[in-house]
Image: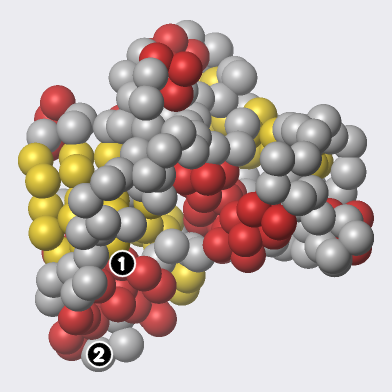
């Protein structure tokens, strides 16, 4: 196992694994304090250069107790691991009043366990990505975002081409303050619309973008569990 500081130290010409080199065998372990949780897209870039066998959050992600800025960063990190095809091991704790979060998050890789305070442990099998691949993802076009939502309650394809909505969507990829995406009336309207469409989730005074970035075109049943592992690029080149 290695931590984020060691991963960054290996991010050098000597530490990177060359194309076609041996597979990574170590697991990156991350604590849940802000110092140990890297920015999601920064981590994705690091893992492209210094691959690992997986990412592990050893402490339960207790959404009933953690501050909102940590919750959105955890969600963003799990989403980015899914996007680049890195296995992520985590567990989730919810308050009894937070069960409505499950259908909003279960397009992401399933936790190993879910604890609902005062009610017990729901089956991880209820997490839909355990048996359904690609429930909610997006691809980037030249001046638009194409979002595919295959969740039964909201099945549709959405084209986001309004510049303000695109800006809010992209800001939310890292998990950010709600005030940042509602800085004026135009941004506030765009943010509320994306929340209403289920593409951005507000957590207290922070928010996070939910769809997984489909960077590669996945193939085969081996990609179940919400992981968009690299398995060949889509040939049309229209989106990324």
Give percent across and percent down for residue 68: 53, 58
Please indicate whether residue 80 sits to the left or right of residue 15 in the image: left
Q: Residue at x 45, y 34 (%)?
A: 231
Q: Residue at x 9, y 40 (%)?
A: 156
Q: Residues within 10 Å of mark 2 (few under 14, many from 20)?
A: few
User: Mark 2 near mark 1, Cβ–Cβ under 8 Å?
Assistant: no
Q: Residue 84, image x and y in percent?
A: 53, 45
Q: Secondary structure at mark 2?
A: loop
Relative placement, left or right, of 57 versus 9 is: left
State whether residue 125 appears in this view.
yes
For this rendering, which residue is in front, 63 or 143?
143
- Residue 120 location, quadrant: top right
Can you identify the residue that label 1 sits on? 169
Q: Which residue bears the numbered disc 2? A: 184
Query: Is residue 128 in sight in this rendering?
Result: no
Instruction: Tell me the crowding category of disc 1: few under 14, some 14 to 19, or many 20 or more residues within 10 angstroms, Cα based.
Output: many
- Image position of 152 (left or right of 88): left
State how far apart marks 2 and 1 are (Cα).
Answer: 16 Å
Q: Residue at x 48, y 38 (%)?
A: 230
Closer to us: 98 or 166: 166
Q: Which mark is residue 124?
A: none
The answer to whether residue 155 is above or below residue 168 is above
């Amino acid at each position: 196992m290695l931590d984020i500081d060691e991963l960054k130290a290996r991010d050098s010409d000597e530490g990177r694994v060359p194309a076609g080199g041996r597979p990574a065998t170590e697991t990156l372990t991350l604590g849940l304090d802000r110092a140990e949780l890297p920015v999601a897209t920064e981590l994705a870039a690091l893992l492209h250069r210094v691959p690992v066998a997986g990412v592990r959050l050893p402490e339960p992600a207790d959404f009933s107790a953690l501050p909102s800025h940590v919750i959105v960063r955890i969600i963003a990190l799990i989403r980015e691991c899914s996007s680049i095809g890195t296995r992520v091991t985590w567990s989730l704790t919810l308050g009894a009043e937070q069960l409505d979060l499950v259908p909003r998050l279960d397009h992401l890789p399933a936790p190993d366990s879910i604890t609902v305070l005062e009610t017990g442990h729901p089956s991880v099998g209820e997490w839909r990505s355990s048996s359904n691949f690609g429930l909610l993802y997006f691809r980037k076009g030249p001046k638009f975002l194409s979002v595919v939502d295959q969740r039964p309650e909201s099945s549709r394809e959405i084209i986001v081409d309004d510049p303000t909505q695109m800006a809010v969507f992209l800001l939310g990829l890292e998990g950010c303050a709600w005030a940042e995406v509602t800085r004026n009336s135009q941004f506030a309207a765009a943010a509320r619309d994306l929340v209403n469409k289920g593409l951005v989730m507000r957590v207290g005074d922070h928010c996070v973008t939910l769809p997984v970035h489909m960077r590669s075109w996945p193939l085969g049943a081996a990609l179940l569990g919400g992981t968009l592992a690299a398995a060949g690029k889509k040939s049309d080149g229209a989106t990324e």
